[in-house]
Image: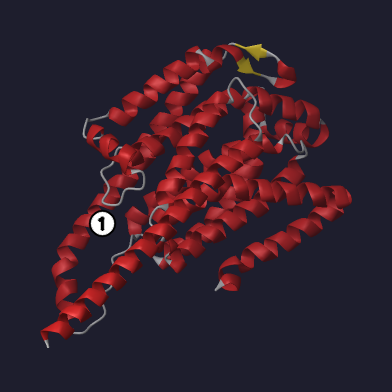
């Protein structure tokens, strides 16, 4: 199971590390290895959230996510995206930007760093909306009940998530963005840029998330229509098949996953410059990490981990909220990637341990109930 799911990741790791040695020697090997670990630690919460969505999709679309989706993630976000940032921020053509990345790495790093406020605002708002929509939804299973119950009641107010997100964006633009961090430790006023980018992130979430939600609702309606037929089949001893996403529903969910991955990758791409400004080594290291995140997502789906450890999805969404806050704060202040990655790992680890305790408590309760039943039967006889 492990080899089948992670086989491509192992192969890409071997090829990537060999390429790193040929390109940059053993120093390049070390840099790529560090970047791979960095990407995995920063994106573990991404894998958990992706798994929650991917488990609803058909096997065909799961394969698309693991193949075409990887190409988009590795070449699109880890290689093309930094070049696009430079091209847009410096008003130059893509060919010039690539040449700059290969020939003048210090200038390339400077341009990417200067573009960070707009990147952080876009990604921060997208991730914040994911977090807000999650915590304001009334769920049957609650992890931090003392917090989630009142938030679920507030969630009945229409457009509350959007209002809060816009308030956060305005506060960020009036505080962090007025002294935005730039290359060399200088600070400039980027309030207008942050506002425009943040609104762009919000609009992107509403369009992609809205389309995904629309088709997901249609799928649920289809499930309800087929519910009686499935029960009838089960009574007749036939296997009950789950309805999974296909067609347009799966396509827009796939699109949603790619935008989600892009938002998660912002901190990894920017953080990579703290280790190297060589675009080739960066693409190799982050690409290897992205492969493991993809494989881990599929592994969680096939093992049914989210169904067994029910609080994992909660922990991942809280990590998303923390990452959104960190991205907005980094508009002005520099925050170590160690802190960014540790927050996500700690929250998911906490939710995992909570799930384990819950499962043990349920098993103990069932065992006790079984003993009581036997006692009653024995005394009755």
Q: Residue at x 25, y 43 (%)?
A: 138
Q: Residue at x 37, y 56 (%)?
A: 250
| Extreme residue toward the right, this view | 25
Tell me, yes or no, if residue 91 can be seen here: no
Q: Nearer the viewer, residue 37 or 64?
A: 37
Quarter of the image containing the N terminus? bottom right
Does residue 23 lie above or below 298 as drawn? above
Q: Secondary structure at mark 1?
A: helix
Q: Is residue 124 left or right of residue 100?
A: left
Where is residue 247 drawn, in percent x and y?
A: 34, 58
Q: Is residue 210 left or right of residue 230?
A: right
Q: Is residue 41 left or right of residue 28?
A: left
Tell me, yes or no, if residue 161 can be seen here: yes
Q: Residue at x 23, y 53 (%)?
A: 218
> Residue tagged by mark 1?
219
Q: Nearer the viewer, residue 164 or 224?
A: 164
Q: Residue at x 58, y 37 (%)?
A: 266
């Amino acid at each position: 199971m492990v080899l089948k799911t992670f086989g491509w990741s192992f192969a890409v790791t071997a090829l990537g590390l060999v390429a790193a040695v040929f390109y940059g020697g053993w120093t390049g090997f070390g840099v790529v290895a560090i970047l791979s670990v960095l990407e995995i630690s920063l994106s573990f919460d991404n894998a958990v959230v992706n798994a929650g969505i991917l488990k609803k999709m058909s096997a065909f679309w799961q394969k698309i996510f693991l193949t075409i989706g990887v190409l988009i993630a590795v070449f699109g976000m880890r290689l093309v995206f930094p070049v696009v940032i430079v091209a847009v921020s410096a008003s130059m053509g893509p060919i010039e930007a690539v040449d700059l990345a290969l020939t003048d790495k210090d200038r390339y790093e400077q341009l990417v760093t200067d573009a960070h406020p707009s990147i952080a605002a876009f990604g921060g708002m997208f991730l914040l909306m994911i977090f807000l929509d999650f915590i304001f939804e009334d769920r049957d299973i609650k992890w931090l009940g003392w917090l989630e119950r009142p938030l679920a009641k507030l969630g009945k107010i229409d457009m509350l998530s959007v209002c809060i997100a816009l308030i956060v964006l305005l506060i960020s633009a009036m505080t962090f963005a007025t002294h935005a961090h730039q290359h060399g430790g200088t600070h400039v006023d980027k309030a207008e840029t942050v506002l425009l980018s943040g609104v762009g992130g919000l609009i992107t979430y509403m369009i992609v998330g809205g389309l995904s939600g629309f088709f997901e609702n249609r799928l649920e309606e289809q499930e309800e229509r087929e519910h009686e037929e499935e029960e009838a089949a089960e009574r007749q001893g036939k296997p009950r098949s789950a309805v999974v996403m296909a067609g347009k529903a799966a396509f827009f969910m796939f699109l949603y996953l790619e935008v989600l991955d892009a938002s998660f990758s912002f901190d990894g791409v920017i953080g990579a410059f703290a280790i190297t400004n060589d675009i080739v080594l960066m693409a190799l290291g982050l690409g290897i990490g992205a492969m493991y995140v993809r494989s881990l997502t599929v592994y969680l789906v096939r093992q049914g981990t989210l169904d067994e450890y029910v609080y994992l999805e909660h922990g991942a969404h809280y990590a998303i909220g923390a990452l959104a806050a960190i991205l907005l704060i980094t508009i002005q202040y520099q925050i170590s990637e160690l802190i960014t990655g540790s927050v996500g790992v700690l929250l998911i680890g906490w939710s995992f341990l909570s799930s384990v305790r819950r499962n043990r408590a349920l098993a103990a309760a069932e065992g006790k109930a079984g003993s009581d039943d036997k006692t009653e039967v024995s005394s009755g006889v």
